[in-house]
Image: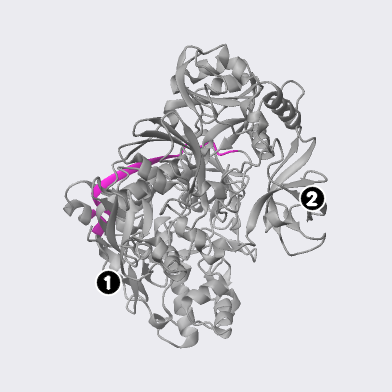
Amino acid sequence: MILIPCPWCGDRDETEFSYGGQAGVPYPSDPAALSDEEWARFLFFRDNPRGPFRERWVHTHGCRRWFELTRDTLSHQISGL
Amino acid sequence: MRFTFSGTEYEGREGETLAAALVRNGVLGGFRSLYRDRPRGVYTAGEEEPNALVQIGARPMLRATLVELEDGLVAEPLAGKGRLVAAPDDTRYDTMHAHCDVLVVGAGRSGLAAAEAASGRVLHLDGGQGTWVVGLYDDNYAIAVEHGRRLWRIRAKRIVLATGAIERPAIFPDNDLPGLMLAGAFQRYGRPVGATPVSAGWSPRVHLWSQARGRLRWDDRTGAPVPDGELRGIECVGTLTGEGLPEAPAFALPDGDEDAMFVDLERDSTVADVRRAIGAGLRSVEHVKRYTTIGTGSEQGKLANVNAIRVAAELLQVPPGELGTTTFRPPYLPVSFALVAGRQRGELFDPVRVTPIHPAHVNSGAVFEDVGQWKRPRFFPRAGEDMDAAVRRECAAARESVAKMDATTLGKVDVQGPDAVEFLNRMYTNAFDSLAVGMCRYAVMCTLDGMVFDDGVVMHVGEQRFVCTTTTGNAAPVLAWMEEWLQTEWPELRVWLTSVTEQWATVAVVGPDSRALLAGLTAIPLGREAFPFMAIREGAVAGIPARVCRVSFSGELAYEVNVDGRRGLELWQALDATPYGTETMHVLRAEKGYPIVGQDTDGTVTPQDLGMDWIVSKAKLDFIGKRSFSRADTARLDRKQLVGLLPAERVPEGTQLVAEPGDAAMLGHVTSSYDSVALGSPFALALVRSGRERIGEIVYADGIAAEIVDSVLYDPEGARRDGRPA
């Protein structure tokens, strides 16, 4: 169980959080202008790197705030809040 | 003190382990092996014991070397396999949480020195003193077991591992005979008469290091793997590192019967088994382990794994380091499920939520069902009634006179702010610009892929203020979903969300006589024009301030009365109507073709599949899910659609539907199925491929013919919604 530094509450156990997947995948500004292919890429395709990964978390059982961090998917080392 | 082993009574001493007492009493055997039924005896003095397994009462697979003797203890030997006892384990287990600056594991010489040198809050644990650290996880999270009864969950800033080394068994023919024991155990038990010490060196106890994903490297000097590389915040000291251990004697396989040279005593695996694995082409020690099952017993390879590597390397004539090492995973020692569960069992396993009206339901003899954590009345049987009879009576009351249901468990989210309308427009498929204060609207929300996620009623209760209801099970997910969008994508919207599920108690008053019943309890004008469908009125009901909504989940004239949760019971008791439960609610709504999210939908169903095109706004530029409705797969015409079914007899929910009896190709499945008093027949809802085009066709549900019909089976013209003419 990893320790996650919530920007509002400090270091808390992973069980207090929910995972929000890859960060930096914003909702398209005009979905209607996208092709089916582009929309499907937004909906269903995410990176899955071995190493540092920018991702979203929410402190569900705490302050309920969303935030981003960089986690190494191999070592779980967290950097760059 | 006295204790009994295998039916014979012995004398024991304070502070002894069961194994020590047996050996002192001259019991060098007394155990059998799992597969070969060979005689075995106490082999070690520690947690690595492979032979001396016992059952004590309800507790199976205890190591005699770790059992502290108590007066009157009764132990039965086990041949590598425990016995589950039917009676519940009434031992009290609990859990503690600890945070410390330094956790030192092991109380040998180097562990003591490390604890002495550490500063701040120091936790020093050692299995020999009763507390075993059994798991080491990411970010210095450790799990420890204190005397088998208390689980410690520990987060340490720094960890010093001083776990020492385990003595290695020697390999030779019949190396499993009772009386043979590791040299360290032989010393510890006071050189017992008739026992013979064996030893083939020492292997560092690398398990916790390996669990924390520390690397291992083969060390030729000790003839065993040792910790390699570094881990954040974890330090290895003492003989765990291999330093200070004696040089291992050169390893060579002796002559003799390889099938009697045991590598894993608990699994009865021998050198012959390793040779067979290698003969089958296996080279990695991980593969040899899986082929031979070496290291997979409850002892988890503490004695066997290193020897398996040494034997395999010898047979292959390669350096042991080339074969790799096994990865050690938690727990280091067997941990009972009861200990992990701790106090969270029985009624404390999961919180039980009840509504303020619950005591009345209990008094009425309601049969409850679990809906998430909630206890909801399923039906209210009278004397002699089974569920079907009770549901028939409850349905008749709702359709012919007046009935009431506790609807408190529906989720409620209070949505406030200047941008609340815009927010709701984006969250739901339908539009709210035209929803006047004092009115409410049925609403559906989808996920981004266009699939139905939840439904409910959005009440416009004041300027810039709405209350959105959710399904009972989705109250928390819907709030989280709303918060996510508000925080991450629409931070510019001035909207505030508050869960008010438990602040309100809600009673649905249903049936053609509901207006007359309420008229006796409130001054709110209830006439058809004064209080139209989907309107909200505020006023006192039975003397309690209430918000009343004219919504209906049954097709009948109905009012949902919302009051302060603390006065819910009072409201319920003031309403003289037949109580009904979720089962009747399901029948009533299904007769009207109203789907239940999560029962008639499963995350692959669009609003259009449900026949609800009308709830998907064409005017709004965008909302969550909109773009997905024009994806090829979502727009195709042969999707499964919700339809009604009239089967010849009642068919179970989940039954597959096919075109001809015996067909394998599935057209769809039954999602809801009931007997209907109003229709005088069984009926069902189903998701069927191109279902709406098939209306009138016959399909088969497990051999039973069923006609596909429109999903609205009762009162399709909606004449009953406004009740009896004035």
Quarter in which the C terminus of chain B is drawn? top right
For mark 2, what is the residue? B706
Is disc 1 in contact with disc 2, using a CB cutoff of under 8 Å? no
* Image coordinates for residue B265, horizontal then vertical, percent: 54, 66
Q: Is residue B161 visible?
A: no
The amino acid sitting under disc 1 is Gly
Vertical relation: B72 (above or below) B663: above
C-alpha gap between disc 1 and disc 2: 68 Å
Side (left or right) of B149 relative to B718: left
> B201 and B164: which one is in front?
B164
Q: Chain of mark 1?
A: B
Q: Quadrant of residue B556?
A: top right
* Image coordinates for residue B24, horizontal then vertical, percent: 48, 51
Q: Where does the magenta region start and end? A: B88-112
> B100 and B649: which one is in front?
B649
* Image coordinates for residue B227, horizontal then vertical, percent: 31, 70
Mark 1: which secondary structure? loop
At 72% from the left edge and 40% from the top edge, which residue is drawn?
B713
At 47% from the left edge and 23% from the top edge, which residue is drawn?
B537
For mark 1, what is the residue? B229
